[in-house]
Amino acid sequence: MTCVGEIRVPLGSTDVLISPLGIGTWAWGDKLVWGYGKGYSDKDLEEAFLTSVERCVTFFDTAEVYGWGKSERLLGSFVRRHNADVTVATKFFPYPWRLRKRALLKALKGSLRRLGLDRVDLYQVHWPFPLRSIEVWVDALADAVEAGLVRAVGVSNYDSDQMRRAHLVLTQRGIPLASNQVHFSLLHREPESSGLLHLCHEMDITLIAYSPLEMGILSGKYTPDNPPRGTRGRRYNREFLKRVQPLIHLMREIGTGHGDKTPAQVALNWVICKGAVPIVGAKNRRQAEENAGALGWRLDPEDIIALDKAAREVLKD
Ligand SMILES: NC(=O)c1ccc[n+]([C@@H]2O[C@H](COP(=O)([O-])OP(=O)(O)OC[C@H]3O[C@@H](n4cnc5c(N)ncnc54)[C@H](OP(=O)(O)O)[C@@H]3O)[C@@H](O)[C@H]2O)c1
C-alpha cells in the first residue's frame, strides 16, 4: 500500500527517508492519559493509520512504554495487514533497573517482536535518565545498528549538551545521530529559546517535535467551557485555556487566508516552517485526515511573526 505524489525528506544525515509530518501513537493503547478503550477503538486507530498512509503521512512513532507494548502491537499489525510502505520509529526506556548496556539490545528485540518486524528505521533513547551515563546507552544504540536491527538511531528529551555528547560517541563509531525528539509547539518554545533547534540545524540532526498540538489544545476545540478531561485537564486548566483563545482566533484567521486551513493545520505547518518534523497524535480517521492537510502549503513569513507574537502573549506571566 503506497500513496501518490509522496514527498519524503532525509532523517538527519542518514539514508532513511521520512514524510515531513509524522504520526505519534502514544494514545494507541494508553488508558491512563488518553483513555484508550473509551471513545475510540482499534478500528478507529486502524482507520487513522490507513487515512494517514493514503494521504502520504508515512512516518510513525511509537515506544515500548506506550500502552505497555500495545501501541507497538497495534502499529505492527496495521503495517503488516496492509503491507504498508512506512517508516517506523520506536524507543528504549531507560528504567532504573536496566543497568547493563546489553539491556538495550534485549529491549529492542522485544519491540521488534511486538511490531512483528525484522528491524526498525529509527531507534531512540526515550529520556536521558542519569542512572547510566549518556555514553553507555548511545554506545548500545551503535551496537544495534551494527547488529542490523535498526537503520538509524536518535535520542529524545536531550538538551544541547547531552545531544553533543551522544553525537560524539556515535561519531567515534562512524554512525550519525539522526534525530532528537523533544516537546516543541507554538505553546512550548524551549527548543527555540535554548538554541537546541538551531544546533540541530547546524549539526544536520532532525528535530522531531512531539505534542505539536499541545495535546489537542491547539486544535481549538478545548475552551474554558469545554476543557479536556483527566490529567490533561489539570495540565491545561480553565485559566490557561482562557489565555489561549486569542491565539486560536488568530490561527483561524490566518488559516482562512490559506484556503480554510484549521487551527490544527496551522499549528503543524508552523512547526514545519520552523524546520522541525511534527509527530501528531491521531485517534481516528477525521483527525488523521485533518492533520494530513498540514502538508502541501506553507505559512507566509509574516504569519509566523504574528503567530510567534500571539503565542508569546499566552506564555508570558
Ligand atoms: N518522546 C517523548 O517523551 C514524547 C512525549 C510525548 C509525546 N511523544 C510523541 O509525540 C506524539 C504526539 O504528541 P501527543 O500525542 O502528546 O500530542 P499532540 O499530537 O499535540 O495531540 C494529540 C491529541 O490531540 C487530539 N487531536 C489530534 N488531532 C486533532 C485534530 N485534528 N482535531 C482535534 N483534536 C485533535 C487528540 O486527542 P483528543 O481527541 O483526546 O483531544 C490527539 O490524541 C505522541 O503520540 C508520541 O508519539 C513523545
Image: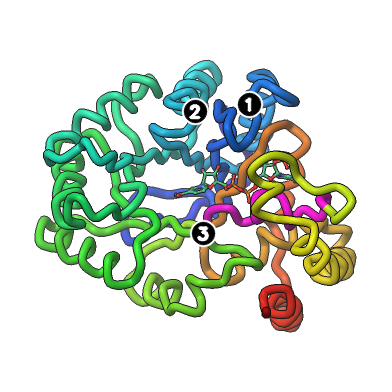
Q: Nearer the viewer, residue 296 or 244?
A: 244
Q: Which residue is mark 3?
A: 183
Inspect the image, locate mark 2, and give the three-letter code of the amino acid beneath it: Gly
Q: Nearer the viewer, residue 166 or 296?
A: 166
Cα distance between the residues tagged 2 and 1: 9 Å
Inspect the image, locate mark 1, and give the three-letter code of the amino acid beneath it: Tyr
**Residue at horizontal 22 percent and vertical 61 percent from the top:** 166
Q: Residues within 10 Å of mark 1 (few under 14, many from 20)?
A: some
SS class, disc 1 = loop
CB at disc 2 and ligand 1 closer than 8 Å: no
Res. 121 image quadrant = top left
SS class, disc 3 = strand
CB at disc 1 and ligand 1 closer than 8 Å: no
Q: Nearer the viewer, residue 282 or 103?
A: 103
Residue 37 location in percent, x, y? 66, 21
Cα distance between the residues tagged 1 and 3: 22 Å
Magenta stretch: give its range.
209-222
Q: Which residue is mark 1?
A: 36
Image quarter hosting the C terminus? bottom right
- Residue 225 lies, with reference to residue 190, above or below; the image says above
Image disc number at residue 232: none
